[in-house]
Image (cartoon, rainbow, N blue to C red):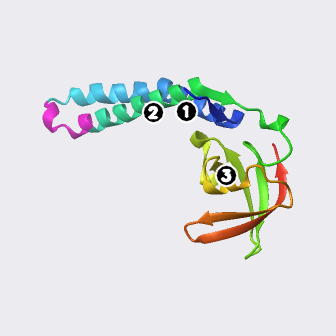
Amino acid sequence: MDKIPMTPEGFKSADKELKQLKSVDRPSVIRAIAEAREHGDLSENAEYHSARELQSHIEGRIKELGAIISLAQVIDVTKLSGSVKFGATVHMIDEDTEAERTLQIVGEHEANVEKNQINMNSPIARALIGKEKGDSVEVRTPGGVKSYEIISISFI
């Protein structure tokens, strides 16, 4: 299997979630199932079915996170420099609207649009990778082609 590139923060986040699921969420849902069983007839017991569904979700997420963590290749981005690559934080400006935007290029499993962390396989990340400060980048989006100028690149 291929390694999964991750930032140290992404790895810590996945590990923290896995520990939470194993030590808190799993025992909690097991108690909820036991309590629901005590209510009698399981065929019409909504609490039981809801708890079993949650248990299935938790167990699936535990497996998924375990696989991600086992294949993780943690990359210390603070030791990187130069052109845009995995882990780079890119500050850029939309050449049409003059709107500024800052994005960090991260692995698929740690991407979070709300935190401006984008998947390294996304169209904008692929367009940015390999570029330097001052370069113009064209990105094909569902709304059309957007042009950005890279203002700065940092690895923090």
Alpha carbon separation for disc pair 1 and 3 = 28 Å
Identify the amino acid type marked 2.
Arg
Q: Earlier in the sequence, mark 1 or mark 3?
A: 1
* Residue 32 image-quadrant placement: top left
Q: Is residue 75 visible?
A: yes
* Residue 149 image-quadrant placement: bottom right
In the image, which is nearer the foreground, mark 2 or mark 1? Answer: 2
Q: Which residue is mark 3?
A: 126
Percent position of residue 136, x then y: 79, 64
Rendered residue at 83%/38% (across/down): 80
Percent position of residue 30, x then y: 35, 25
In the image, which is nearer the foreground, mark 1 or mark 3? Answer: 3
Q: Earlier in the sequence, mark 3 or mark 2?
A: 2
Report the disc number at residue 7: none
Mark 1 and mark 2 in contact (Cβ < 8 Å)?
yes
Q: Which residue is mark 2?
A: 61
Alpha carbon separation for disc pair 2 and 1 = 9 Å
How many numbered discs? 3
Report the disc number at residue 17: 1
| Residue 47 highlighted magenta (yes or no) | yes
Please report the bounds of the magenta region as a residue range: 41-49
| Residue 139 highlighted magenta (yes or no) | no
Q: Is residue 14 left or right of residue 155?
A: left
* Residue 72 image-quadrant placement: top right
Residue 102 drawn above or below residue 55 = below
Identify the amino acid type marked 1.
Glu
Q: Residues within 10 Å of mark 3 (few under 14, many from 20)?
A: some
Mark 2 and mark 3 in contact (Cβ < 8 Å)?
no
